[in-house]
Image (cartoon, rainbow, N blue to C red):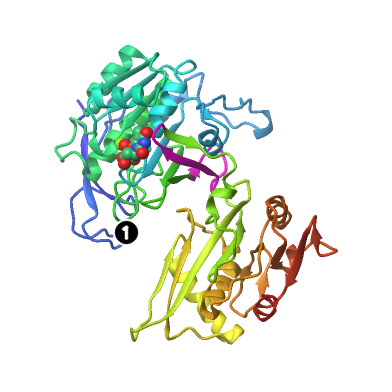
Amino acid sequence: ASKARTAYVCSECGADYNKWQGQCGECGAWNTLSEFVVEPAVKGGAPNLAASRRASWAGRADAPVVTALKDVTHQEESRVTTGIGEFDRVLGGGLVHGAVVLVGGDPGIGKSTLLLQAITRMAQALPGLYVTGEESLSQVAGRGARLGLPLDGVHALAETCVERILEHASKMKPALIVADSVQTLWTEQLGAAPGSVSQVRESAARLVRYAKETGTSVFLVGHVTKEGGIAGPRVLEHMVDAVLYFEGESGSRFRVLRAFKNRFGAVNELGVFAMSDKGLREVPNPSAIFLSGSRAPQPGSCVMVTREGTRPLLVEVQALVDSSPLSNPRRVAVGMEQNRLAMLLAVLHRHGGVAVGDQDVFVNVVGGIRVQETAADLPVLLAVLSSLRDQPLAEQTIAFGEVGLSGEIRPVPNGEDRLKEAATHGFKRAIVPKGNAPRGGRVGEMEVIAVERLAEAIDAI
Ligand code: TYD
Ligand code: MG
């Protein structure tokens, strides 16, 4: 009889070893190997797996054959709405039947709240099982009641052992399972402690297998580790259909749900929520909330139009530039990448003739949103300049554009959309790359100033 084999798998690159070793021979990372049980093959688990497969395929009616791709019949994925528009948007238009979706985020960000809201609203279409390993059933029910959620059709289970969870699931046959959180799950197959990378991976793998065998949809909740991954980088991300991150600055009530991977939709789609005393509320027209509120122009502030996912968003970038007591002045970026800020400041010096070498520079994207696209380059530099000179930009001005290393302002995708969004919100002036500017230099009431070089943009303000 075959036995389950133990393997050691690197949590960085996924390389597989028979014996434990301190350093991964593939990627060179240290102390990343952890124990896994490899299931024996379905029949016999023969060492000569290839031969036994060949033998068993040969006579089968359903043996794979080469087919012209155009002749392959396929169906559109059928989707169910989560009852939350912003959630549907990030999923690519609703939850696909049988999909496994990982929802990651910092502890306390609102993952349990969001999924409880979703599972109760989906109960009509998909009878759900909410498995909690972190809270008691009464805490879950209490939250549901307090949020005024319809609790009919949703069952709950306080259990962390994956074998027992699946036993209940095979009896109850829910169409949707929420496992909150993967970090609390463990399987009897492994000796490792719950929460260890191997337990998390193996438990998640079992749920994924169950989902694929039965067509059950599954939401896995995962806390983000301090390195920024869910239970170690890339361990779960490749085995699920979609990975969504729930983000927000502490102290801000706004939350952004972002698709990081999605087999059934676009990545970088954003869903925007506000945490209230009645749970998470959708913010279907988010542009307004990412402006700091005061429309009277302040030094160090520039409004940009970012386009994460499929809709443009007005977002305010703030900068504070102040003479530094340090020999190595600070560059702090919140909501954008630190290295990019350092690079932009170098371009500002070299091609704009503005030195900030002896200044601390802080940049913040208002509202707890993260801007990843290069369209933020120009607004960041304009905010920095405005703070340095202690002069606000002209009232009702927006900007966007990528800044190249030779000081050129490069166009960004969907310029027209961005300009329209700004004009709709009553902005009067836009400083944008030449390649994004419309002929005639206007969009509605808004004047569009086209710039090709950083120096021109500096002249324009
Ligand atoms: P939770 O969903 O438990 O976070 P996670 O599962 O990601 O750890 O959310 C917890 C936080 O949300 C907690 O700090 C309280 C806050 N909250 C509200 O402000 N309003 C609400 O209606 C709820 C349910 C939570
Ligand atoms: Mg939780």
Q: Residues within 10 Å of mark 1 (few under 14, many from 20)?
A: few
Q: Nearer the viewer, residue 79 or 209?
A: 79
For ligand 2, the image quadrant comes to: top left
The quarter in which the C terminus is drawn is bottom right
- For the residue marked with disc 1, what is the amino acid? Glu
Residue 155 vertical position relative to residue 297 in the rendered view, above or below: above
309 inside magenta stretch: no
Q: Which residue is labeled 1 in the image?
A: 26
Span shown in magenta: 258-278
The reply, left or right, for residue 326 in relation to residue 372 is left
Residue 145, position as x, y percentages in the image: 34, 22
The reply, left or right, for residue 29 in relation to residue 63 is left
In which image quadrant can residue 392 be found? bottom right
The reply, left or right, for residue 16 in relation to residue 260 is left
Q: Nearer the viewer, residue 309 or 250?
A: 250
In which image quadrant can residue 178 be found? top left
In which image quadrant can residue 3 be found? top left
Q: At 55% from the left edge and 59% from the top edge, which residue is drawn?
A: 316
Residue 251, position as x, y percentages in the image: 37, 51
262 inside magenta stretch: yes
Question: Quick check: can you spot residue 215?
Answer: no
The quarter in which the N terminus is drawn is top left
Residue 417, position as x, y percentages in the image: 71, 52
